Amino acid sequence: MNNMGIMLKDLIDVTENYHTVLAENRKLFNELQELKGNIRVYCRVRPFLLEENPKLTTVGHIDENVELVLVNPSRERKGAHRLFKFNQVFGPTASQIEVFLDIRQLIRSVIDGYNVCFFAYCQTGSGKTYTMVRS
């Protein structure tokens, strides 16, 4: 009986140490997230709908997953191309899994009790619901 008491005490000590290490891990992880920047801007170019012509796109190109060039064919030379920089750009062929893999660290922060906001902004019918809800 005495031996079981010693083993139980050892088990309690290990459990307490585990929770201490886990709390420190959470703290360090979320400090790392803050160092990356509390505000990050992602862009997702939605896939074309069946009735849309892919040749009529205004997306000039996506460069190294952080730059997006939009083309306005109605403008002459000046201002026809506009460059935008983001933390991450997901092209029209990006899957929900690719998007999730990139933001899953933010999901972990939510689970750890930190505040996180996902905000989708664009015109009606452009794919906000698809991006935020669809699995």
Image (tube, rainbow, N blue to C red):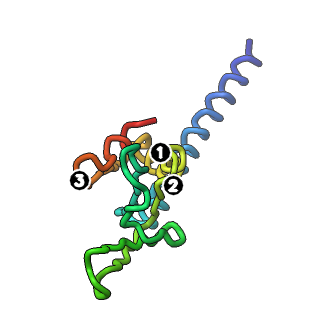
Front tag of 2 and 3: 3
Task: Tell me the residue that label 1 is attached to.
Answer: 108
Mark 1 or 2, nearer chain start: 2
Question: At which x and y percent is residue 115?
Answer: 32, 48
Circle 2 Cα neighbour tier, 10 Å, few/some/many (<14 / 14–19 / ≥20): some
- Residue designated by label 2: 29
Identify the element where label 2 is drawn.
helix
Q: Is residue 54 above or below residue 62?
A: above
Given contact means CB atoms under 8 Å apart, are the residues at marks 1 and 2 in contact? yes
Could you tell which of marks 2 and 3 lies nearer the N-terminus? Answer: 2
Q: Residue furthest right?
A: 3
Asked whether 82 or 56 is in front, the reply is 56
Is 75 left, or right, of 67 in this rendering?
A: left
* Camera-side residue of 12 and 31: 31
Q: Residue furthest top?
A: 1
User: Which three-letter amino acid code belongs to the residue tagged 3?
Assistant: Gln
**CA distance separating discs 1 and 3:** 29 Å
What residue lies at 69% left-to-right and 19% top-to-bottom? 5
Q: Earlier in the sequence, mark 1 or mark 3?
A: 1
Asked whether the viewer can see residue 26, the reply is no
Disc 3 element: loop
User: Which amino acid type is marked by label 2?
Assistant: Phe
Q: Amino acid at mark 1?
A: Arg
Q: Is residue 86 above or below residue 101?
A: below
Q: Nearer the viewer, residue 33 or 4?
A: 33
Q: Nearer the viewer, mark 1 or mark 2?
A: 1
In 3D space, how far apart are the residues under numbered discs 1 and 2 (Cα atoms)? 9 Å
Up the image or down, 130 lies above or below 82; here it is above
Per the image, the residue denoted by label 3 is 123
Quadrant assignment, res 122: bottom left
Q: Marks 2/3: CA distance?
A: 35 Å
